């Protein structure tokens, strides 16, 4: 229990930022002043197979170790496929980002749209983020 | 049995597995009569490469087909086909060419 | 941890595993384009979207035509310009298989 708590605290202190995809669109500064606007949506992500694997290594009881290894293998088989970052349990979290962005721009003129797919990771747990930054032409 | 296994292994090896790396679609025009497309690829052994110049090939291919025109509604796919130790990276781009 | 807790832990983990199986997803990228210029008035603009999927078993996939499928579905909904286009590529994970998904959205501006 002590080891689990210690490793957990260490993981929480070693948060990393990760950048997966960046896109920058045209920036038009000729139509007026620019006001920065931004939308960020994120979803809790966890790699359960890694958690099970780490738990099996930390377990002291041999039977518990074997059971956790089996759970790790089942999880890896059950959630197979390409992934960017840790998997999430809801894939709808980024569907309304554009509507949210437009809500921040009263003139409806948007330029310099930057779209990034990033994350803040704490080992096997992370926040998977889709961020849209742009300028609203006032 | 062994011939069957060899044939099966050959079939699996040569069929390849295609995966999509990235996709993008730009603003689509009203006039969509002239669709043009261009592809470019390169081969990697064990995933090693030192350059990505094949991307420009796809862009130049599109430009060649739409000289003096405006190219919009560009759909770009970057995909990889895996054949055991060898990978084929491909850019497939298509768009609508409008010449005023 | 007492014996009762230990006895409960593994069944609890097993139930959690079964509940969580095949439930994970991953958004790979979101691409946007066509935000230049002012958005048209509500009477001339219509929000459209199109989705397509591809089921893949153990990495065996012949093509990526589901992308063109989504694009064609989007085009069919609009005879005018399509602006503010966004493309989302994601994967839903499963047991020895997964589903690649494309979601394309845009604003159809009637001429």
Image (spheres, rainbow, N blue to C red):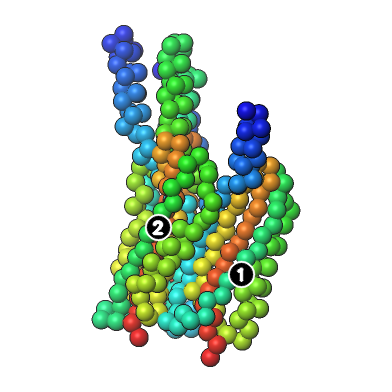
Residue A91 in the image, given as x and y percentages of width and height: 36, 49
Q: CA distance from mark 1 to mark 2?
A: 23 Å
Residue B93 in the image, given as x and y percentages of width and height: 57, 67
Judge by depth and name the residue closer to the eye, C88 or B100.
Answer: B100
Residue positioned 40% across, 79% down in the render: C81
Residue positioned 37% across, 47% down in the render: A43
In the displayed structure, B88 sits above or below B67; it is above
In the displayed structure, B62 sits above or below C94; it is below
Q: Chain of mark 1?
A: B
Q: Is residue C77 left or right of residue A128?
A: left
Q: Which residue is mark 1?
A: B38
Q: Which residue is mark 2?
A: C52
The answer to whether any part of residue B74 appears in the image is: yes
Pick out the residue farthest to the left.
Answer: C43
Residue positioned 69% across, 57% down in the render: B42
Q: Secondary structure at mark 1?
A: strand
Q: Chain of mark 2?
A: C
């Amino acid at each position: 229990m002590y080891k689990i708590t210690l490793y957990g605290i260490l993981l929480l202190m070693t948060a990393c930022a990760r950048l997966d995809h960046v896109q920058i669109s045209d920036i038009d500064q000729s139509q007026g002043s620019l006001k920065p606007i931004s939308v960020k949506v994120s979803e809790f992500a966890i790699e359960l197979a890694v958690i099970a694997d780490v738990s099996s290594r930390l377990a002291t009881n041999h039977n518990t170790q074997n059971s956790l290894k089996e759970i790790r293998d089942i999880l890896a088989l059950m959630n197979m496929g390409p992934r960017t970052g840790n998997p999430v349990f809801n894939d709808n979290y980024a569907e309304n980002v554009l509507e949210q962005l437009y809500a921040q721009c009263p003139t409806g003129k948007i330029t310099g749209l930057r779209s990034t797919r990033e994350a803040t990771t704490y080992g096997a747990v992370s926040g998977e983020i889709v961020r849209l930054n742009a300028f609203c032409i006032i | 049995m062994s011939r069957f296994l060899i044939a099966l292994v050959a079939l699996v090896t040569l069929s390849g597995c295609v995966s999509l790396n990235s996709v993008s679609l730009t603003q689509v025009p009203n006039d969509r009569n002239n669709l043009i497309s261009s592809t470019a690829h390169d081969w990697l052994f064990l995933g090693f490469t030192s350059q990505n110049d094949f991307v420009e090939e796809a862009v130049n291919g599109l430009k060649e087909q739409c000289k003096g025109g405006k190219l919009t509604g560009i759909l770009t796919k970057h995909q990889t086909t895996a054949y055991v130790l060898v990978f084929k990276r491909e850019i497939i781009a298509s768009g609508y060419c409008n010449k005023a | 941890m007492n014996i009762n807790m230990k006895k409960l832990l593994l069944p609890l983990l097993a139930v959690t595993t079964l509940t969580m199986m095949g439930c994970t997803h991953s958004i790979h990228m979101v691409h946007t384009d066509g935000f230049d210029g002012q958005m048209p008035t509500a009477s001339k603009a219509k929000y459209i979207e199109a989705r397509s999927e591809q089921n893949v078993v153990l990495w065996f996939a012949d093509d990526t035509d589901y992308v063109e499928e989504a694009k064609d579905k989007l085009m069919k909904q609009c005879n005018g310009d399509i602006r503010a286009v966004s493309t989302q590529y994601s994967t839903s994970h499963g047991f020895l298989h997964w589903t690649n998904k494309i979601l394309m959205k845009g604003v159809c501006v009637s001429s």
